[in-house]
Amino acid sequence: MKTRDLKLEIKALDERGEFEGYASVFGNVDEGQDVILPGAFKEFVKTRDGKTLVLYQHRLGEPIGKADVDQDEKGLSFHGQLVMEDPVARKAHTHMKAGTLDGMSIGFDVLRGGAEFTDDGTRVLKALKLWEISVVTFGMNPLARIEAVKRAGQISTIREYEDLLRDECGFSNAQAKLLAAGGWKALQAARDEPGEAGAAQSLLDYLRNVANPKT
């Protein structure tokens, strides 16, 4: 599952934990050079009552509510309800009101044939499967994952390291496994392995861009 972040744009937030806004905006190129086309969300993972899960910081073990989502001309709009009996949801609510939790993000998969690249390297997303929406700390800067840095010292197994890279750093399952297994050398070797070449090359390009940002 991949993620895509943006500045949290809340139209309403009340004391009962109801909030609404946009979880994704169509037509703008993000820092990872992705752009989502209007109507790109083709499949939705739903709860039993037909809602979309709201997570805290993309942590699968910390759902904090549910939302109705819909696509309009601007993007993926939502009307959510936090579970205010949950202390994590109350924490999120407090920080959302204070403006210290001001990012919104989506967790999605690209469907078969759902992406294409332009000449300048921009990935155009046109067919997606939505898994969840999340409130996150740094919606406009996916590299600034302070919680991930704090938790890194508590990692004791390679599986926990993979979970950290995937859930809090925004890497895909394949990329997280490659990084956890052997870092840069593993990425270089994996470019020649069937089934791993694409994930390895995209992550290498990403890391090179971080190390040598465009001015």
Image (cartoon, rainbow, N blue to C red):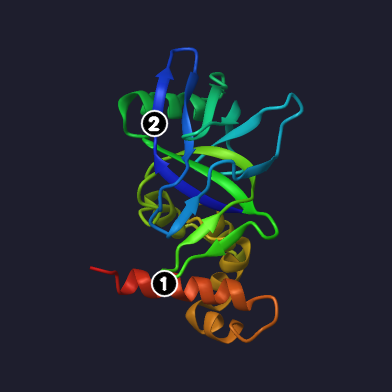
Q: Image point 32% across, 73% down: which residue? A: 211
Badge 2 element: strand
Foreground residue among 111 and 102: 111
Neighbour tally class for label 2: few under 14, some 14-19, many 20 plus, Cα within 10 Å: some
Residue 7's spot in the image, x, y percent? 37, 39
Number of marks in the rendered image = 2
Q: Image point 56% across, 57% down: which residue? A: 166
Residue 32's spot in the image, x, y percent? 43, 59
Instruction: Name the mark on residue 48.
Output: none
Foreground residue among 73 and 98: 73
Which residue type does callout 2 highlight?
Answer: Glu
Residue 133's spot in the image, x, y percent? 55, 38
Rendered position, 127 above or below 193: above
Neighbour tally class for label 1: few under 14, some 14-19, many 20 plus, Cα within 10 Å: few
Foreground residue among 79 and 61: 79
Residue 127 visible in the snapshot: yes
Instruction: Name the mark on residue 207.
Output: 1
Residue 1's spot in the image, x, y percent? 62, 54
Instruction: Name the mark on residue 9.
Output: 2
Identify the mark nearer the N-term, 2 or 1: 2
Q: Image point 71% across, 34% down: which residue? A: 46
Give the position of the C terminus as an image quadrant.
bottom left
Tag in front: 2 or 1: 2
Rendered position, 65 above or below 181: above
